Amino acid sequence: MNVHAPTFFVPPRPAAPTKELGLYRFLVAARTNALQIWPKSAYEQDAVVGSAFGRTRMLINAPDAIHRVLVDNTANYCRTSATIRILRPIVGKGLLLSEGEDWRHQRRTIAPAMAPRVVPMIARHVALATEETIAQVAALAARGPVDILATVQFLALEIAARSMFSLEMRQYGAALRRLITRFAASLGRPYFLDLMLPAAIPTLRDLARMRFRSRWVAFMDEIIAARLRAPPDGRPHDLFDMLLAARDPETGEAFSRAQLRDQMATMIVAGHETTALTLFWSLYLLASSPADQDRVAAEVRAVDLGPDAAADALAKLPYTKAVVNEALRLYPPAFTLARMAVGPDRLGDVAVPRGALIMISPWVLHRHLRLWKDPDAFNPARFLGDAALPHRFAYMPFGAGPRICIGAQLALTEACLVLATMIQRFHVALADATPVLPAAVIVTQPDHAAPFRLRPRN
Ligand code: HEM
């Protein structure tokens, strides 16, 4: 035995079924915990191909096949009916669900607003909101265990609201969270007919989704009206200012008011829960691996994370960044990307018929036995400068190709700065021994709100 071999924390994960699930169990797992859809063999093979009601569905793991779907032949792979049906009420006609020329126009127009030059503006919002939340958390921590999931969800929403609208969410936060949580708990889950029917045929659940949409649109319009009442001073303060001023570089076209609302809704929904969960899992992993927590604590001890210094601090946080990358590997918030084949194609040896459902699962890829050494172990050093980078299509928490996440830079900025600040201020530990398991419903969340003990650091 090599006495110097490091021992890594191996977090628990849901058991994979020993063989492929039949249709009924597949649909139940899709609604309750989609991480249990894939059989053990999926973590070793290039593809898993099945069919239901004459429709082919396939999970692809081979880098070349993923490259073809997400980069080389994107025109042949569109969003699925189920994705459109479930997300349309909340993201409307924003970037996430658009296709073709409409998508290109939206992406060209938004991209400059998300470029690295906005990082200092975002970093300032992050630092200010984090300072305030930490003051509240310190008071709670003095009284007993803290619900870290609720804390990071609150903070991520606050940061989203400030980076997008410069608004504090005291007035709107509770209502916003209520609307999103209610949606996620029922209307946002895929049901049998959602998965089986084309998007053009509405189901009873779609009628409820339409009612939700009217409430949601009215609410977003109210926030935007409040934002517009703030007197302009000629300087961009937030992403709303950037998108209001944005023009398509090819056509000069601006967004209409309705388009602007859908973009803002898209970003709030796509961005805040995903980033909150990245933070939750990063803190959970550090609480479970004291040596890694000590290393982050040493790295952040003397770093100024205040609003004026936060953007420059990012370059001083390589280990913190590696922890965030590793948390995104072990718990990718977007656990599956789904596409429908518009026409026939070929992915390596596998023929793709028209209408096939193609799934690319960061959850499976990130734990694939052929792509990673010790895939279940928490080892942030995989992402340090001198480590060999994983294959481009073995690690894709933000997707890949032209539709790669447009908010990735902002999410990483936020996650690194908040994690660094939390560990600078507190020693974090789990308050009980109940295993924390990931459960994927819309995003990869913990199966319960694990309590944490936070002890202030000197
Ligand atoms: C850790 C946090 C995040 C994760 C893990 C994540 C993950 C992803 C993934 C995997 C995709 C590609 C989906 C696909 O190809 O089907 C995506 C797309 C997208 N994300 Fe994110 N995201 C995060 C944060 C954000 C933030 C902060 C924003 C906005 C401020 C955002 C906005 C979007 C949008 C608008 C798209 C659609 C892009 C397009 O279709 O062109 N995301 N995200």
Image: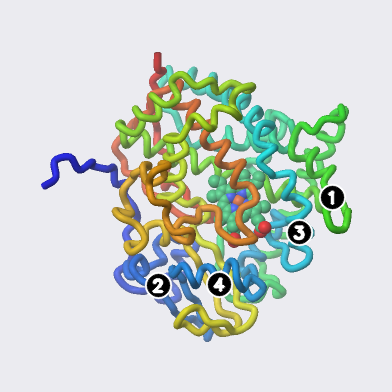
Name the residue that disc number 2 marks: 46
- The image quarter containing residue 6 is top left
Q: Is residue 154 above or below residue 208?
A: above
Callout 1: SS = loop
Q: Position of residue 372 (x, y in %)?
A: 34, 57
Q: Amino acid at mark 1?
A: Arg
Using the image, tell me which numbered label, if any, was put on residue 247: 1
Classify mark 4 as within 8 Å of ligand 1 or not, answering yes or no: no
Using the image, tell me which numbered label, if any, was put on residue 93: 3
Question: Toward the viewer: 183 or 262?
Answer: 262
Answer with mark 3 or mark 1, whichever residue precedes in sequence: 3
Classify mark 3 as within 8 Å of ligand 1 or not, answering yes or no: no
Q: Position of residue 453 (x, y in %)?
A: 38, 26
Name the residue that disc number 4 marks: 68
Question: Badge 2: how crowded within 10 Å, few (<14), some, or many (20+)?
Answer: some
Answer with mark 1 or mark 2, whichever residue precedes in sequence: 2
Answer with mark 3 or mark 2, whichever residue precedes in sequence: 2
- Quarter of the image with the C terminus is top left
Callout 2: SS = loop
Calculate the distance from the C-alpha at mark 1 to the C-alpha at mark 2.
42 Å
Between circles 3 and 1, the one closer to the viewer is: 1
